[in-house]
Amino acid sequence: MLLTRQVLSTHFDARPSNVVPELIVIHNISLPPAEFGGPWIDRLFTGSLPLDHHPFFRTIPPGRVSAHALIRRDGEIVQYVPFHERAWHSGRSEYRGRAACNDFSIGIELEGTDDTSFEAAQYASLSALIRALLVAYPTLSREHIVGHSDVAPGRKTDPGVAFDWARLRASL
Ligand SMILES: [Zn+2]
């Protein structure tokens, strides 16, 4: 059973009509960068990040962002947006010639950095979450799981070189 917490964000809207989830996009995030365990990701995704708390926070481009879920270092899954809704995680992006990946994707963040090994508990939760999503949304598939860097090359580098794609794929 997954340990899950819900922190409902208002940073989402409806997918375009007749558009269903067909892609899973993996990200990483940490706030401030490379510091783990704080409440700041929840605060960012709910529009309540205190900009005075850390100098880095003022460098984050303004705008409302979110992801469907975050997997913390201990494997805890935090859900921000219902999976059938459109979360705002990929920005300007394209997958196999199709633009605006948020329309047709589910965005999952891993608490981490591009070059820090992710925890075994994170791989376990990520695998369990994806397997549950594959059951819930038959339009998803193991073949359509990518990184943010794959759909926004040159602009984004996450989930980064430390993310073990072979390990994820072997677990699905
Ligand atoms: Zn990302």
Image: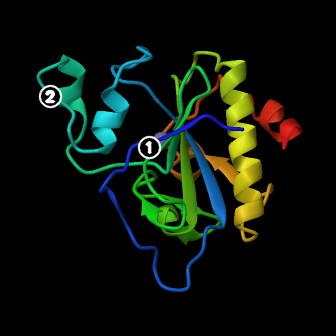
Callout 2: 10 Å neighbours few (<14), some, many (20+)?
A: few
**How far across and how far down the image is residue 110, in percent?**
55, 32
Earlier along the polypeptide chain: callout 1 or callout 2?
2
Outermost front residue: 1
Q: Secondary structure at mark 2?
A: loop
Residue at position x 16%, y 29% in the image = 50
Kind of residue indicated by mark 2: Leu
Image quadrant containing the C terminus: top right
**How far across and how far down the image is residue 79, in percent?**
49, 45
**How far across and how far down the image is residue 74, in percent?**
59, 20
Residue at position x 25%, y 34% in the image = 60
Residue under pointer 1: 155
Instruction: Tell me: 21 left or right of 69.
Output: right
Mark number for residue 61?
Answer: none
169 over 11 or under it: above or below: above
Kind of residue indicated by mark 1: Arg
Outermost left residue: 52
Residue at position x 70%, y 52% in the image = 145
Q: Are marks 1 and 2 in contact (CB under 8 Å)?
A: no
Mark number for residue 51?
Answer: 2
Q: Secondary structure at mark 1?
A: loop
Question: For residue 40, which quarter of the picture?
Answer: top left
Residue situated in front as seen by the camera: 121 or 88: 121
Residue 159 is at least partly visible in this image = yes
Whole-number angstrom distance, CA of label 1 to CA of label 2: 24 Å
Instruction: Tell me: 50 left or right of 72.
Output: left
**Mark in the foreground, 1 or 2:** 2
